Image: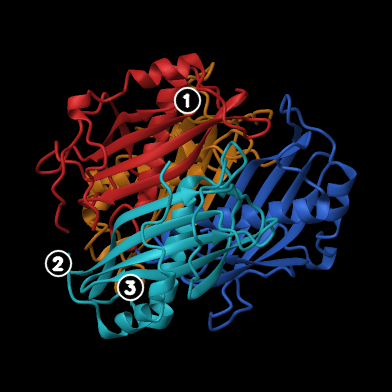
Chain colours: A blue, B orange, C red, D cyan
Amino acid sequence: MNRPQQQTPRFAHRARVGTRWDDNDIYGHVNNAVYYQYFDSVINAYLIEQGGLDIHRGDTVGFVVRSECDYLAPVAYPGELEVGLGVERLGRSSVTYRLGLFDPRAPDPMAPCALGRMVHVFVRRSDSRPVPLPEGLRRALQALQFDSADTPLGQVTRI
Amino acid sequence: MNRPQQQTPRFAHRARVGTRWDDNDIYGHVNNAVYYQYFDSVINAYLIEQGGLDIHRGDTVGFVVRSECDYLAPVAYPGELEVGLGVERLGRSSVTYRLGLFDPRAPDPMAPCALGRMVHVFVRRSDSRPVPLPEGLRRALQALQFDSADTPLGQVTRI
Amino acid sequence: MNRPQQQTPRFAHRARVGTRWDDNDIYGHVNNAVYYQYFDSVINAYLIEQGGLDIHRGDTVGFVVRSECDYLAPVAYPGELEVGLGVERLGRSSVTYRLGLFDPRAPDPMAPCALGRMVHVFVRRSDSRPVPLPEGLRRALQALQFDSADTPLGQVTRI
Amino acid sequence: MNRPQQQTPRFAHRARVGTRWDDNDIYGHVNNAVYYQYFDSVINAYLIEQGGLDIHRGDTVGFVVRSECDYLAPVAYPGELEVGLGVERLGRSSVTYRLGLFDPRAPDPMAPCALGRMVHVFVRRSDSRPVPLPEGLRRALQALQFDSADTPLGQVTRI
């Protein structure tokens, strides 16, 4: 695969994720759907630990309404990968995350193996209606916003 | 969630997928990453059965280089869902699939619960270099192309 | 793999499960953990549809406290498999399920590809304390009990 | 759930595994099938790193022919868990692993949250016939064998 020309954003948050035996598909690489499991796990762990999200009993829950990913270079079990997380757009009830997947053992560990986006809309658990972002979450997400000079909005090359 | 205004394409191929207990996440709905498992499963089953793809020993394998999905209405285990599959763009080595997820038990079973796209690049298994689509695959994929009048290129509303 | 000598129980309930692209691992067969997803999905769908289990809001939930499986012959995506489900032991709060996995396209579709067991303990959702089986669930589970003449208790050959 | 009385073996190898968002099921705990993904991942990483197993191109591959697990206390995303791995029985072509799952944040982090077993039979990739364990794998597995005084063979209490 050729790597589309694009700028890698500087992600304010980075976290390790472990690969699993069954992440590899029959072709020997991590399956495309698993990347979203990595992204989702890093996003929600951040919201829980930094933003006070209570996934078990909280009134406010985050629903994913859009996701996308460009797969730039294959990755594989075993070993750990690194996910970079930033916030591209912060609305009243919604947030657009920008994500990068990095392989510490790759020839260039700074080059992303994948670049993704996910959009959360925060809703009331009881009736799934959008609600304003609780203050704790908003502060945690603001800390992840890209500098305007660094914002790579819409720069992913489509194939 | 409000449903973005968009046109649902007429999918040339439709197939059932079964939900699983563990598809539901802690919020009681099918997890966002699982939608790509449904899509991937319907795509590859079609390629195997109609296009002669040999996932075990074939020289040519399909790598996913991009995926995206708009989640329009939640779905949940138990029960079966339906996936609609069409081809939006057919290149020399690559194909862009358009996918819809439908819930036969929804109030309006014709309204998609999700609309996605996936892009396959076909490569030589031995060295991962792009190759022209084998003739059997090309014929099978041509049969899924949208009529030009019906092609909903890029019409998914972004949030 | 050689197939241990064992008697296949006559399962009172049978249901189809669809395989998925990512069920296949790097060796080209369905991954061992996925068998439990099949089993769990058939068990819970039966409890929901026949026993009135409400997985979203019910007071009583089933926790798996033990699972085991003998893998007798490999299976693979694509295609559908069949799960046989019976009840080996029905206690006050717990039930031991016996499960078989069958491949309709195998040379002998009556020979199980896997035989498993799972044990549910039913607990109160609020405090995870065991509770007596609700009457609807008990009746549904009684209907799956093996005839004493047919009960294959403990007959799985260990390797 | 009450915790069956049983002795926890002293595992020669221990490794961390990360939980994922979608490991939690609708009841808020890690799904029972996921425990086997943890076990499988730690086993194979050990075989690859210490025993020279080549999962991509090696002649010898390990097929799981039996698995079992007792779930003693629930675990949940987010956070890391620890897997203990030992070898209970080492045959000519097969190995029986003993596994424990530990939660570093539990009140008693030394008490296992789950105890499992998995059996690998090593076969030739080309024809799936059992083969003697390659020397590198055998040495790596011998290093994990329990002391006879410590071997907890068959001590898991069945419910």
Quick one: B44 or A136, which is closer to the camera? Answer: A136
Query: What's the residue at 50%, 34% (across, down)?
Result: C121
- B151 vs A100: above or below: above
Give the residue type at disc 2.
Arg
> Would you call the spot at circle 3 few (<14 residues within 10 Å), some (14-19), or many (20 or more)?
few
Give the residue type at disc 3.
His
Give the structural element (helix, strand or loop) at label 2: loop
Quick one: A60 or D118, which is closer to the camera? Answer: D118
Tell me the distance, in whole angstroms, between the alpha carbons under discs 1 and 2: 45 Å
**Residue tagged by mark 1?**
C92
**Residue tagged by mark 2?**
D129
Give the structural element (helix, strand or loop) at label 3: loop
| Comparing labels 1 and 3, the label whose residue is closer to the camera | 1
Image-based side of B76 in relation to B133, left or right: right
Give the structural element (helix, strand or loop) at label 1: loop
> Would you call the spot at circle 2 few (<14 residues within 10 Å), some (14-19), or many (20 or more)?
some
Residue D124 place in picture, x, y as percent = 18, 71
Give the residue type at disc 1.
Arg
Image-based side of A41 in relation to A74, left or right: right
- Give the mark nearer the N terminus: 3 vs 2: 3
**Residue tagged by mark 3?**
D56
Disc 2: which chain?
Answer: D
- Residue C122 in sight in this render: yes
Instruction: State the mark number for residue B126.
Output: none
Residue D41 place in picture, x, y as percent = 45, 65
Tell me the distance, in whole angstroms, between the alpha carbons under discs 3 and 2: 18 Å
Tell me the distance, in whole angstroms, between the alpha carbons under discs 1 and 3: 49 Å
| Comparing labels 1 and 2, the label whose residue is closer to the camera | 1
Q: In which image quadrant can residue A88 be found?
A: bottom right
Q: In which image quadrant can residue B107 be found?
A: top right
